[in-house]
Amino acid sequence: MACPKLYTTTEEQVEAARARKLAYYYHNRNQLLKKMKKRYAKKVGKESSGSDRRRKMKEPAQEPAPSSSEVTALARQIQLVDGQLYALTDNSIRSYSARVCKSAMEPGALPDVVEKALDRVRLMQDDVLNSHNVIYSAAGISKDWQDAQPTVRWFQRMVEYLEDMECHVMEGDLRQAYSKKLLAYQASTKW
């Protein structure tokens, strides 16, 4: 009796090979890191020559890294802005985009309805991105950084939807795009 074929297509074989390599790395990462450090130390060595001194340029003084309490404060600030986004969108980016679109299509609506909504979201996004970048530079990919990642994605998606709407407003075909369901928030399967 022969073993059944595990992978019938080349895509499945490639995915299985990737999974095996990834599993190997995660199971043996400490040993691999030690080996890489030893190889690097052998390559570089402890020699110092005049040419090395010329290559090493004096780096500008860096700002001191924020302390853990500052990182926590930044994470709380991101959570606060995330709460503001939830309040603004009623926890649904699509429904908020639909409301903005419908208010822009109403007769007698101001032409900058979408632009004002986009500016408001971008201001909130700038705060989140700045805090997120400071957390990353201070603590790397930490728990606080990972907790803020979905909020960053929400803002990116929100800005994408509103920018798409703004483009259609500028072209003057918002109603057509809405009726044909060509707007980004209508076509997207996420969120």
Image (tube, rainbow, N blue to C red):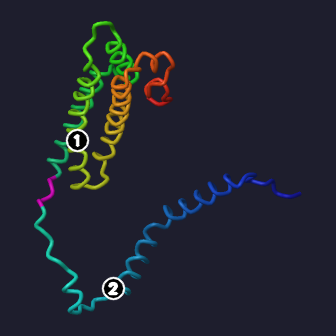
Please, which residue is most extreme toward the top here?
Answer: 107
In magenta stretch: residue 2: no
Left or right: residue 122 versus residue 12 is left
Q: Is residue 16 above or below residue 76?
A: below
Location of the C terminus by quadrant is top left
> What residue lies at 22% left-to-right and 41% top-to-bottom?
75
Residue 101: name its quadrant: top left
Marks 1,2: beta carbons within 8 A: no
Q: In this figure, which residue is indicated by the disc labeled 2?
A: 44
Q: Secondary structure at mark 1?
A: helix
Location of the N terminus by quadrant is bottom right
> What residue lies at 50% left-to-right and 29% top-to-bottom?
189
Q: Secondary structure at mark 2?
A: helix
Q: Nearer the viewer, residue 189 or 143?
A: 189
- Residue 149 x/y as whole percent: 34, 42
- Residue 40 x/y as whole percent: 37, 81
Kindly report the distance in space between the C-alpha atoms of the residues bearing marks 1 and 2.
Answer: 39 Å
Q: Is residue 123 above or below residue 42?
A: above
Amino acid type at mark 2: Val
The boundaries of the magenta stretch are 63-67
Left or right: residue 104 versus residue 15 is left
- Residue 95 x/y as whole percent: 39, 19
Amino acid type at mark 1: Ala
Counting residues from the start of the chain, the first of labels 1 and 2 encountered is 2
Q: In this figure, which residue is indicated by the disc labeled 1?
A: 75
> What residue lies at 28% left-to-right and 45% top-to-bottom?
144
